[in-house]
Structures are given as structure tokens and as C-alpha cells.
Image (cartoon, rainbow, N blue to C red):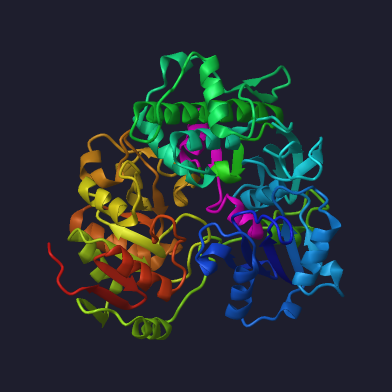
């Protein structure tokens, strides 16, 4: 049975939700997942057509060879308007076979399926948190979308075997401000723009202190039935909403706020602390209710590694988040949903849980012959040398040892926003100056930390709690050990933490070999690893993307398959 999952746009001809993607499952095997923006090269692009065609072409499949297409929506009713369904039947050429179009019952349920079925747990609590998911029912919104409607914002599920059951929701009402929306309001207020930049707020939070006026002021409350409510109001003007909340607590800000101001840093600290606190408080009640201490987190808020680690540390539970918890991961959640449901795996709680493996590297892969052709077509300018490497991992490690910053393009691309060693920019973690240079080349703010990939067997030598599930996918932060921080200054944030990727040999042998070689040369079992892209652009997917971005950024070298492209004169 072949299943395509797609994360679709909202309505034909109108606004497209961001974070489109497509995924392919073949007889229960995860075959390929690609975000729309990796192909269109427009970051966070909505829709699915480019990604879908790319998958079909890559595997030489026709639309007719797909047994089911499974879709989900954002900001739409649980039962979508008939015109929307008709559009998808037409677009997917299913008008004569409408039974092949499967609808996931809700946006949050798709997140729940990817969060739980990729986890190692056979029973878990699932927490899904984001801006909004599906519209539950309308108040007076006159079909104008999520504004003025009852929506999914925080949803909680219990999962056992192949059955996922809704426990409850928080922040359903039209004016409610849940975890995702509040964090995004503060992100915009600080000057970072929309919710896609929430990671900047998380990084900035370590530089601030909670204003004394807000030390006892909460954004949320919990009633006697353990339901969360918000003290912040929703007017759909984020600046006004934050100003109003601050004013009620004795704070008036009459100047521009950004990442360089004390106010910006302090507000980042406040919203991060509140998120940490109330996520723990809520999950504590769910653990007491169910007796389950395995936690799966999904939805956009799950990208907050500080919160994830705080939950794990404070509650003594195991936490898992997929490497693609945001909307770009919806297509795989949809495909998994269809596989489980169409195979009737959820009819009996005693059936063994369906397991899915190898879910990190789900993109495209290229041969050296294809890469060589791309290099020829790129017409590499003078000042660069191109050579086939006898040992690409060793040569790359030696460049990094000499403080060179390299592009690393190998194997199948990662699915999701975390570069986990196949579409990465790599550098020496021993120097804060090198970290700053990487940020500058990527056109990122210099206050933002960079994450290290560390050999799993040595992670505990440098970091506390390095064996967390979160550390496999850069979705949790850990404290660097005292006495070790100076040796890896480029990989440690101002608060002494690192968002590590702990790597075992079998997970990515070539990348492991590079780091092992670097360790043998330097005694440091890790490299700095950040996504291979310039700020504002998607991560590279193809050799063409990699070469173009490498040259535009001015990196020192590019290890692309078995080929090494580098500046002809590399100063030490």
C-alpha cells in the first residue's frame, strides 16, 4: 500500500498556510519526506505540489500508482468546506476515485501521530501546542477563518499501542492566548517578526532577567479542574496586547524594543520562564491523572528545546519530540495516520504498536556522478579548486581542525528544520570567534548560539544529562560540565548550556567518521553544526543548492559527496 501524506494550503485561490510538505510511505516503510520550500526555494512555502512532484519523479511513480492521499489543514474547520475537498479531488486527479482521499480529523491529531508513532514509547502522554490548529466550531466568524473561532491551541492525548485518545484541550475559546500565541506575541514585540523566529527569542532569553514587576505576574492560571486560562487578551494586535499586559503589571515601555535593549532581553527571559513553568504545571496534572511518565511533544512549540529539557528535568520523565514538530512535519503525520487507520491497527488496544524507523534522513540523495555534473554546470569561479577526495571525512576534519568553516553535503537530506549532519555547516567548537564568524556568514544575529554534534560515547564527558532522547535530534538543551566549557567555547551559550546532537556511529556513519577523526586530532569529540543555508533561505536540498549557497556565503570549503571544493588559498 502506497500512501502520500500532504500538508495542504487553506483554500483554493486564497491564503496559503506556511510549512507545506509531502511524504511517502510504502507498505509501512518511511520512504521520503520533503518540505515544499526545499524545492520551491521560498522559505516556509505553503502547499504541496512541488514536494509531491519531486517525490513522484524521484521514485519514478505516477499519481495512479498511489493508493491513498492523506491530507490535513490549518485554520480550517474539522469538516472542511465541500469546495475545498472538491479542489483537492481535482488537483490530485481523484474525482473518479474519491475514496482514495483520506482526511485527518484534525490538525493537532496529525501532530500527535508523528509525535507518538516515531517515539520509542508504547504508552505516552502527547502534548500538542501551537498557534492554532483546526477550527473546532465557529462563534461569529462567518467563515472568516481562525479569528473569532474556537480552535485547537493546546491539545493533550493519551496513547497506548496504536490508539490515540483525546484527553482535553486548553485555550479553545476565540480570545484565548495559549503557549504558542503568547510566545509569538512577545517574539514580535521584541522585533523578531512572526512565529518562525521564535527560536531567536529562546536564544535571547538567556541574556535577560525577569523585571521585578513581573516576578509574581503570571501569563496563565490553572483552575480547580486543572484547566489553563490566560491573563493576556487577544485583539489580533500583538504589540497592543503585550503593552496592555505589561501596563496592567506596572510596566510602561515608550521606546523601541529589540534584541540589543535590556527590555528586549528581559521580556524574552520572562516569556521563556512562563512557558517553562506552565508546561510543567500542566503536564504534572496529566501524569497524575494517567500514571504515565513518557511524554511526546509536537506542534511548533515543541521546537523550544529549553522548555523540553525543563519538563524532563523538573518532572523526572522521558520526553520525545520528533525532528520535525512544526507544520512541515504534518505530511508524515498524515501518512502515518492513514497507514494505521487503513490497516485497522487501532481497533484493539492489545495490538502491538506499529513502529517506524529511520525517520531522520528522508530527503533526496545524489551520486558522485550527479554531483560532478552539477559542479561542471555551476562553472566554479577562479580562486577555487575542485578535486575528488580519497577520504572526504578525513580531509573535512583537518579543515575544521584548522578553523575552516565548511559546507557538508552528504547522503539523504534531513526532514525538518534541524540539520543533523547531512546538510550542515561545520566548524571548530573550540573558539567563540569561529562561532561568531559562522553567524556572520549566515547573516544571523551574533547573540544566537550554535549547536554541537558530539559522539554519543563521549557526550557525558562534556555535558550533564546527555543521554536524553531530546539530544538525538537537537531538541533539548543540557548544561556543559564545569571545567570543560572553555575547551568548547564556541558550542556553549552564555548560560552554560548547549543544544546538542548526540550521535551514534550507526545513525550516520560518514558524519560520525568525520567527528571521530576530528576527535583523534584534537581531543574534542564534537563539531559545531548548523543548517546549511543563509538566513531567510531554506536549507539546501540539491548539489546545485549547495554549490550556490557555498559560493554566496564565502565558506572556506564544500564537501559535496566525494568532491571537495575549496578556496585555492586558505589562510591559517
Residue name at image x 56 percent, y 33 percent: 238
Rendered-image quadrant of the N terminus: bottom right
Front-most of residues 232 and 24? 232
Front-most of residues 281 and 44? 44
Coordinates of residue 497 in the picture (x, y in percent): 35, 38
Asked if one can make out residue 31 in the rendered structure from this viewpoint, the answer is no
Asked if one can make out residue 452 in the rendered structure from this viewpoint, the answer is yes
Coordinates of residue 255 in the picture (x, y in percent): 40, 26
Rendered-image quadrant of the C terminus: bottom left
In this picture, residue 185 sits left or right of residue 266: right
Q: Residue furthest left?
A: 572
Residue 295 in the image: above or below residue 515: above
Coordinates of residue 27 in the picture (x, y in percent): 70, 70
Residue name at image x 31 percent, y 71 percent: 559
Front-most of residues 557 and 243? 243
The segment highlighted magenta reads 304-332
Coordinates of residue 569 in the picture (x, y in percent): 14, 71
Q: How many marks?
A: 0
Residue 190 in the image: above or below residue 422: above
Residue 411 in which image quadrant: bottom left
Q: In the rendered structure, does residue 32 fall within the stretch colored magenta?
A: no
Q: Residue furthest front?
A: 254
Residue 359 in which image quadrant: bottom right
Residue 133 in the image: above or below residue 28: above
Front-most of residues 54 and 394? 54
Residue name at image x 79 percent, y 62 percent: 102
Q: In the rendered structure, does residue 328 fall within the stretch colored magenta?
A: yes
Amino acid at each position: 500500500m502506497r500512501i502520500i501524506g500532504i500538508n495542504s494550503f487553506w483554500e483554493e485561490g486564497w491564503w496559503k498556510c506556511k510549512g507545506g510538505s509531502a511524504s511517502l510511505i510504502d507498505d509501512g516503510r518511511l520512504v521520503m519526506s520533503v518540505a515544499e520550500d526545499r524545492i520551491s526555494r521560498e522559505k516556509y512555502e505553503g502547499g504541496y505540489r512541488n514536494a509531491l512532484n519531486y517525490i513522484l519523479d524521484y521514485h519514478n511513480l505516477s499519481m495512479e500508482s498511489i493508493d491513498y492521499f492523506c491530507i490535513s489543514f490549518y485554520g480550517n474547520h474539522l469538516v472542511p468546506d465541500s469546495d475545498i475537498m472538491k479542489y483537492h479531488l481535482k488537483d490530485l486527479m481523484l474525482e473518479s476515485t474519491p475514496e482514495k482521499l483520506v482526511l485527518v480529523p484534525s490538525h493537532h491529531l496529525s501532530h500527535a501521530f508523528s509525535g507518538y508513532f516515531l517515539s520509542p514509547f508504547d504508552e505516552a502522554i502527547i502534548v500538542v501546542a501551537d498557534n492554532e490548529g483546526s477550527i473546532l466550531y465557529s462563534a461569529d466568524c462567518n467563515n472568516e477563518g481562525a479569528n473569532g473561532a474556537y480552535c485547537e491551541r493546546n491539545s493533550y492525548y493519551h496513547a497506548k499501542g496504536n490508539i490515540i485518545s483525546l484527553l482535553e484541550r486548553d485555550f479553545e475559546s476565540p480570545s484565548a492566548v495559549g503557549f504558542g500565541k503568547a510566545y509569538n506575541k512577545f517574539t514580535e514585540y521584541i522585533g523578531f517578526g512572526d512565529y518562525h523566529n521564535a527560536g531567536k527569542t529562546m536564544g535571547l532569553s538567556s541574556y535577560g532577567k525577569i523585571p521585578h514587576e513581573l516576578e509574581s505576574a503570571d501569563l496563565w492560571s490553572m483552575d480547580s479542574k486543572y484547566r489553563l486560562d490566560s491573563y493576556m487578551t487577544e485583539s489580533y494586535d500583538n504589540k497592543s496586547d503585550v503593552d496592555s499586559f505589561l501596563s496592567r503589571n506596572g510596566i510602561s515601555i515608550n521606546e523601541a524594543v529589540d534584541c540589543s535593549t535590556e527590555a528586549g532581553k528581559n521580556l524574552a527571559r520572562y516569556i521563556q520562564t512562563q512557558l517553562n513553568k506552565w508546561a510543567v504545571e500542566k503536564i504534572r496534572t496529566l501524569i497524575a491523572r494517567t500514571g504515565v511518565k513518557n511524554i511526546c511533544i509536537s506542534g511548533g512549540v515543541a521546537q523550544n528545546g529549553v522548555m523540553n529539557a525543563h519538563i524532563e528535568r523538573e518532572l523526572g520523565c522521558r520526553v520525545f519530540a520528533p525532528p520535525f514538530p512544526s507544520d512541515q512535519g504534518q505530511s508524515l503525520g498524515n501518512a502515518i495516520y492513514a497507514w494505521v487507520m487503513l490497516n485497522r491497527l487501532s481497533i484493539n488496544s492489545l495490538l502491538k504498536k506499529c513502529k517506524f524507523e529511520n525517520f531522520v534522513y528522508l530527503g533526496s540523495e545524489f551520486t558522485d556522478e550527479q554531483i560532478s555534473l552539477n559542479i561542471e554546470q555551476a562553472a566554479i569561479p577562479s580562486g577555487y579548486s575542485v578535486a575528488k577526495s580519497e577520504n572526504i571525512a578525513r580531509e573535512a576534519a583537518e579543515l575544521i581542525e584548522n578553523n575552516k568553516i565548511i559546507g557538508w553535503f552528504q547522503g539523504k537530506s534531513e526532514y525538518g528544520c534541524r540539520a543533523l549532519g547531512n546538510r550542515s555547516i561545520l566548524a571548530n567548537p573550540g573558539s567563540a570567534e569561529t562561532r561568531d564568524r559562522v553567524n556572520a556568514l549566515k547573516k544571523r544575529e551574533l547573540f544566537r548560539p550554535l549547536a554541537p554534534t558530539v559522539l554519543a560515547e563521549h557526550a557525558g564527558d562534556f555535558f550533564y544529562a546527555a543521554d536524553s532522547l531530546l539530544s538525538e535530534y537537537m531538541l533539548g538543551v543540557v548544561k556543559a560540565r564545569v571545567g570543560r566549557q572553555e575547551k568548547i567555547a564556541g558550542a556553549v551559550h552564555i548560560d552554560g548550556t548547549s543544544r546538542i546532537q548526540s550521535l551514534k556511529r550507526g545513525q550516520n556513519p560518514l558524519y560520525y567518521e568525520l567527528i571521530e577523526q576530528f576527535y583523534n586530532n584534537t581531543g574534542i569529540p564534537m563539531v559545531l553544526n548548523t543548517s546549511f543555508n543563509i538566513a531567510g533561505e531554506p536549507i539546501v536540498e540539491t548539489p546545485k543548492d549547495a554549490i550556490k549557497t557555498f559560493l554566496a556565503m564565502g565558506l572556506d570549503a564544500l564537501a559535496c559527496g566525494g568532491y571537495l571544493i575549496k578556496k585555492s588559498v586558505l589562510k591559517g
